Amino acid sequence: MKEVKYKDYRIGSNLYTVKLTYLPTGGILHYNPTVKVNIMEWHTQPITFLDKILEHFKFSIESYEWDPLLTDLSLTDYCIKKCSQIAEIDDAIKKTNNEWDSFEGE
């Protein structure tokens, strides 16, 4: 059975919930144990069966797979790196929207 853990990360002003799923027989391309890293908008851990089903559709941003044979990063560092990449994109979008709102044109 798959093991699932949740961890929250704050990157600047952005807050993310990371769902970690241990895959003992590997993922899509691998046969060694890996961890599926699903980065989501911040939310509390789902309790009901319906919440668990709808969680992916409501909160998911990006999904990755951490394979210790393909990276030297620890699982924690990998999660922080991926959250940081998403935070940079979010910050750029916020900056664009703020610039557009404050722009005075003809």
Image (cartoon, grey):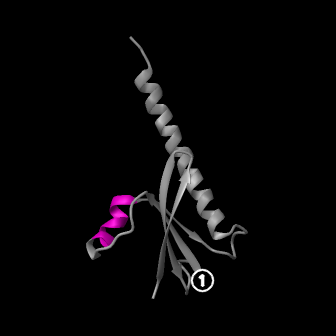
Q: Residue at x 61, y 59 (%)?
A: 80
Is 24 inside the magenta-drawn segment? no
Q: Residue furthest right?
A: 72
Residue 65 placement (x, y as % from top left)? 56, 70
Residues rendered magenta in the picture? 51-59
- Whether 28 is drawn above or below 12: the answer is below
Residue 12 vertical placement versus 29 (above, below): above
User: At which x and y percent is residue 60?
Assistant: 41, 60
Q: Is residue 72 left or right of residue 82?
A: right
Q: Position of residue 19 (x, y in %)?
A: 47, 68
Quadrant showing the N terminus: bottom left
Q: Between 44 and 53, which is closer to the camera in this rendering? A: 44
Magenta-colored stretch includes residue 58: yes
**Residue under pointer 1:** 33
Look at the image and tell me in which quarter the C terminus lies.
top left
- Tag 1's secondary structure? loop
Residue 103: percent from left, percent from top: 44, 19
| Image mark count | 1
Q: Quadrant of residue 25?
A: bottom right
Overall secondary structure of the magenta section:
helix
The residue type indicated by label 1 comes to Pro
Identity of the residue drawn at 52% across and 41% down: 91
Give 29 or 55, whichever is nearer the viewer.
55
Of all residues shown, which one is farthest toward the left? 50
